[in-house]
Amino acid sequence: MPTDKPLISVLMPAYNHQNYVQDAIKSIINQTYQNIELIVVDDGSKDDTLNKIIELKGECEKRFTNFSFETQQNKGTCETLNKLISKAKGDYVYIVASDDLVKPYAIECQAEFLNSNPQYGLVVGDNEIIDSNGKKCYWDEKRNNVYSKNEAKFLTFADYLKNGCSFFNDKNFGSYESLQIGNYIPNGYLIRKSILDKVEPFSKEAPLEDYFLMLQLSKYAKFKFLNKVLFSYRWHGANTITNIEKIEKYTNMVKQYEKEILSKLDFKNTLPDVERVVKYGFCYKSFGVPHLFEIKKYLKDGKKTRIVNIFNYRVHTYTL
């Protein structure tokens, strides 16, 4: 369908979600924003996920500017996401898991923000919590689902994330330095594709895909949090995040892999990006986190020189 609005690529990796994948796809079909392409890759599901997607093929082809679907032998989330991104043709990219739901007005709301604010590369809203049956719920102190606000400690996902993070109403929301405490970005983010094209691909060495992606994007762009519910985050027994020991292990793996990336960077041809990182990302003593980015200036041969150390690696020395 012809439109003068930017194309948005919605990317959906699907795996063993036969009970949820149709609802996830229908939540994209029902978006008020019209110029959408939907790209789905089934990562070798062992249940009936594949057939559930095929059942909606005709409806998707009628609704979307482009609908692309394929299945593959199981390769894991990282390779699947890299494949999906490589297929995206839109100006913006929206990644959604095949068991979550997107509010009908979400993509339109987020696209309007990025269209009006070119200095931002990512925008995200709050997430309501739903159970395995799609019923709205809340969390108690231990993140068990409860159905009464009187029993609830956290009413939304952002409520929970704010509990250990003060950046939501702060200009430092999504900064590289603040993300050293861990990933606090909710689900359902819209990303400017030109920024996504700059970053490292997903890797099995960094198995918390969302956290790894946020670290990479924060080097190049500002993030914005919209204080409105735009997404339904399904919380059930299969959530990876419920395994605390695994999450701690995976978080450390992401940070170690990030050190390796930074140690190999050559900033000679990307000085503007380095300056952007310096401006937006680092050395906030009030955060209570280590100084991961240290800048020293000194005079050498009458010229001002800057040494950049990241994670204790000397990455580059250049003359201003």
Image (cartoon, rainbow, N blue to C red):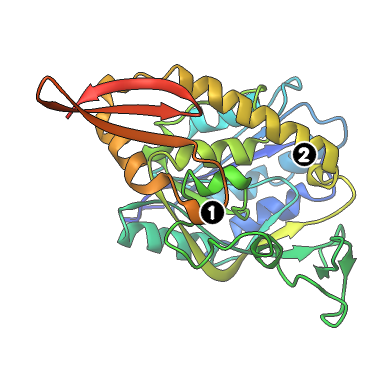
The foreground one among 295 and 237 is 295
Residue 166 in the image, given as x and y percentages of width and height? 57, 63
Q: Quadrant of residue 219?
A: top left
Q: Residue furthest left?
A: 302
Residue plotted at (87% across, 45% down)? 238
Residue plotted at (55% across, 50% down)? 62
Label 2 environment density (alpha carbons within 10 Å; few <14, some 14–19, many ≥20): some
Q: Nearer the viewer, mark 1 or mark 2?
A: 1
Is residue 227 shown to the viewer in this render? yes
Task: Report how far apart the C-alphas of labels 1 and 2 lie in the structure.
Answer: 22 Å
Mark 1 and mark 2 lie on one chain; the one further toward the N terminus is 2
Helix, strand or loop under label 1 = helix
Please give the label number shown on residue 247. 2
Residue 304 in the image, given as x and y percentages of width and height? 16, 29
Q: Residue furthest bottom?
A: 150
Q: Is residue 239 above or below residue 34?
A: above
Q: Tell me which amino acid carries mark 2.
A: Ile
Q: Which residue is mark 1?
A: 287
Q: Quadrant of residue 229?
A: bottom right
Q: Tell me which amino acid carries mark 1.
A: Phe
Please give the label number shown on residue 116. none
Is residue 33 shown to the viewer in this render? no
Helix, strand or loop under label 2 = helix
Residue 316 in the image, given as x and y percentages of width and height? 33, 21
Residue plotted at (77% across, 32% down)? 249
The foreground one among 187 and 257 is 257
In the image, taking residue 125 as reference, residue 295 lies left or right, namely left
Q: Quadrant of residue 73?
A: top right
